[in-house]
Image (cartoon, rainbow, N blue to C red):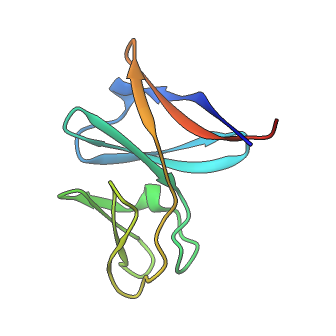
Amino acid sequence: MVMQWRYAVDASAVDEEDVVQVVIENRELAVYRLGEEFYATEDACTHGQASLSEGVVINGVIECPLHQGRFCIRTGKPRGGPVSVPLRTFPTQQEGGKVFIRIDAET
């Protein structure tokens, strides 16, 4: 399997301490902005399959809109019940005002 960078979103489309959903190769991902840094996780909560991009970002933590489970945006680790399974995270990079995400790609 090869890791490839894919365009996700314009940096200006993601406000500070906010989250947006993007779809890359049929994968729903959540892209977050914390300061000038961008982070990406899978969009589905590991507990209730809710869309995290509909949740609330506070101090580097995303809160699921369904059962209020919380995850660290930077690491994907659970930060509060009822969630116990971490989120998958993806590397990001900015270039020319655009955010790219590195994802697995079939070779």
Residue at 46%, 41% in the rendered image: 91
Side of 49 relative to 34 (left or right) = right
* Residue 80 image position (x, y, % from top left): 30, 81
Where is residue 50 shown, x and y percent of the image? 54, 70
Would you identify the image quadrant in which residue 107 lies?
A: top right
Residue at left 38%, top 62%? 55
When the figure is inspected, residue 29 is found, relative to residue 94, above or below; the finding is: below
Q: Position of residue 83 (x, y in %)?
A: 43, 82
Residue at the limit of the structure toward the bottom, as seen here = 82
Q: Residue furthest front?
A: 1
Of residue 91 and residue 19, the one placed in the foreground of this image is 91
Q: What x and y, as percent, mark residue 76?
A: 40, 63
Numbered disc total: 0
Give the side of residue 32 with respect to residue 23, left or right.
left
Taking depth in this image into account, of 88 and 34 the one nearest to the observer is: 88
Is 31 drawn above or below residue 75 in the view shown?
Answer: above
Residue at x-position 27% and y-position 36%: 37
Residue sitting nearer the eye, 64 or 35:
35
Q: Quadrant of the N terminus?
A: top right
Instruction: Name the residue at the right extreme.
Output: 107
Measured along the vertical axis of the image, is residue 93 above or below residue 103?
Answer: above
Looking at the rendering, which quadrant does residue 77 occupy? bottom left
The residue at the point 46 percent across, 61 percent down is 52
